[in-house]
Image (cartoon, rainbow, N blue to C red):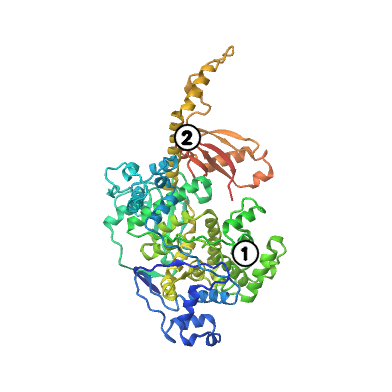
Amino acid sequence: MTMEMKDSGSVVLTAYHPHSPARIPVMEQSFAQDIPPSHSPASRKSLPRCRRINRMLSNESAPPPTFSRSNSQASMDSTSMEDFWCEVENIKESREDGSEEATLLEFKPADEGELEAEWLQDVGLSTLISGAEEEDGQALLSTLTRTQAAAVQKRYNTYTQTLRKKNKHTVRDVRDIFGTNDSSLTFETVPVPPVPSNGIQLPGQKPVWKSVTSNSCLDCGLDKGSPSITEELSYEVSFSESITVLTKTQEWPKNQRFKKEDSALPKFIVRKSRFGLTEVGDLSPEDMKKIRYLSLIELTAFYDALGVELKRNRAERVRGRENGLFGVPLTVLLENDQKKVPGIKVPLIFQKLLLKLEETGLETEGILRVPGSASRVKNLHQELEAKFYEDTFDWNQVRNNDAAGLLKMFIRELPSPLFTVEYLPAFIMLVEKISKIKLQLQALHLLIMLLPEANRDTAKAFLQFLKKVVANEGKNKMNLWNVSMIVAPNLFIYKGKRANQQEMQAAATTAHIVRLLIRYQDILWTVPSFLISQVRKMNEAAMNNSKRQLMFDKGVRKLLRRKTMERDRPERPEGAVTFPPYLQSDIPEGVIRVYAPLHSKVSMAIQLNSQTKAKDILARFHCENSRGSSQNVRGQIQSLHEIGGNIGQHCLDPDAYMLDVYRANPQAEWVIKPKAS
């Protein structure tokens, strides 16, 4: 079965999320008003809930809500989306019986120029608003590509024009920031790169990556029925730079077929560069903060290049509970849990629910789809709140379908959506406005990079579990599309005056997003190498700015002059030999000193060649310390880390070629230690 997608009309969807008591969701009111008389509460209770939804959307009763089908909206029928609507009805009934509290997130209308000001702040360029000359903002601007700079320039132009209209304080001219003679947006197309970063091979050109072994890649393909053509992805060039080229020579199709079969998804392979691959947990929090800045700029430039407006919500913060398990913000949950388990990244209750289902529920037929008993789930919910942190809760009493219900309830009751209020419209737009799955994947990749750390880590754990559910399809009868339809309404639920129409339009879209998240999760949690290169340049620029500031600081110069004059020349010991400066360095070119503080042999100088990999260094240390190290150290998975220089901290891929990494950051220190979990 196929679903037809056409170019979109303007459908504005805003996020709905459950949390606080005593408020009836607008969505539910609208939903009830649109139900035909034949589906009144009195009459519908004699029918199974899934059948009731089916009849609502079929010709047996009143016709389903009509809506204008647009370019990207998927046509659907009651059969293909039955699981989605069953889940919507299950969610509605769980709230009606009081087992789940609900509220709406309030959205504030944005004044003219406010969205641009917020955008500049979110990308780390608040200095453009304040007018201050801060080093971080200058360092960030110095690393931008042409398309990224154009995106910043466009938002800054809009912001300054708005301020001038309002006769507010003087703002910096855009020409002072970007060094242009004209404040208008004139921008040249970048030259065609050897291989665009979206992996499209141009005629007569060879890939820019260096040869690696066939298993040195990240394979996110299909387990069965996969297409014969495998597409390769490269992250050497920014996505937006490649789009600038492609849109000149390629028109987007006016119609595309949206298929729900698993085999419809392409198979992608990410080739490892000489630097290997980097996961989000491999970088320091400081560098990941810069990745978030750059990802938002890149995402905006990417959407600009495609002619798509990047819409963001402005939501008032909803204060959640400060203790307990359900309805508590992720950051608060983690703060409480880290007092018990230091360094934990995913809430304990969420981990325990996933563990329970992985141990006993993966082979349960209809897991996630078949709802548990509403009364049992309500009682378990209350019992967990009272006993979980006391370690007196009996998990053996929890049935698999009830555990799945608690898992979905946890996600729905988060005060802020797992994928954040601000960027939910961007998730929708990447499917409604972008036709090619490869480009959808690139946009989704940047959105994942934008997530706060707590959201990203929790989402990763959830998607890893969903992948295991799909892997057991033969026993649990839950394929990728089934799982996606069940999970989608728990992540993306909308409110509005015409809630049924908006949900109808978003149903297949949100299910497709979840499907991409599950299928390509290994790619999505890999940091694109062009962003890491920009972080290195940003750090180098910040260091250079600091050095220049230090050199021109009068107080420092006076202090150095006085210290120089007062310092006595040290006496040369008898028989001492003075070496020329080029021989005084401890470590010659191409040699690194690796430290392993947890091993018996704590350091070693290693000569690098073009074939030395990080795993070779690890193997050498393991061999040298196989007898002297403690049993705990030998049992841990050790990784080689690049620390300092132009990076905060970077856990290296075992397949990274060390001479290339060394040349990219010759000032770094090299330390072997356990990888952060």
Q: Is residue 458 above or below residue 549?
A: below
- Total numbered badges shown on the rendered structure: 2
| Vertical order, 424 against 204 (above or below) | below
Q: Is residue 58 above or below residue 600?
A: below
Question: Callout 1, which amino acid?
Answer: Leu
Q: Quadrant of residue 328?
A: bottom right
How far apart marks 2 and 1 lie (CA) works out to 45 Å
Q: Amino acid at mark 2?
A: Pro
Residue 332 spot, x, y in % from top left: 60, 57
Q: Position of residue 672 (x, y in %)?
A: 58, 41
In-front residue for pair 468/419: 419
Q: Which residue is mark 2?
A: 666
Disc with the residue nearer the chain's start (2 vs 1): 1
Horizontal side of residue 392 vs 330, given as left or right: right
Query: What secondary structure is marked by label 2?
Result: loop
Query: In the rendered view, does 64 fall on the left or right side of 344?
Result: left
Question: Residue at 70% across / 65% down in the picture?
Answer: 393
Image coordinates for residue 29, horizontal then vertical, percent: 49, 77
Return the x and y of residue 435 as percentages of the image width and height: 35, 64
Question: Looking at the rendering, in which quadrant would you find the N terminus?
Answer: bottom left
Q: Residue 353 — which label? A: 1
The tag on residue 593 is none
Q: Nearer the viewer, mark 2 or mark 1?
A: 1
Using the rendered view, name the quadrant where residue 114 is placed. bottom left
* Mark 2 residue crowding within 10 angstroms, few (<14) / some (14–19) / many (20+): some
Figure quadrant of residue 320: bottom right
Contact check, label 2 and label 1, Cβ < 8 Å: no
Q: Quick one: 27 or 426, which is closer to the camera?
A: 27
Residue 198 seen? no
For label 1, the crowd category at 10 Å Cα-Cα, with few meaning under 14, some 14 to 19 and many 20 or more, is: some
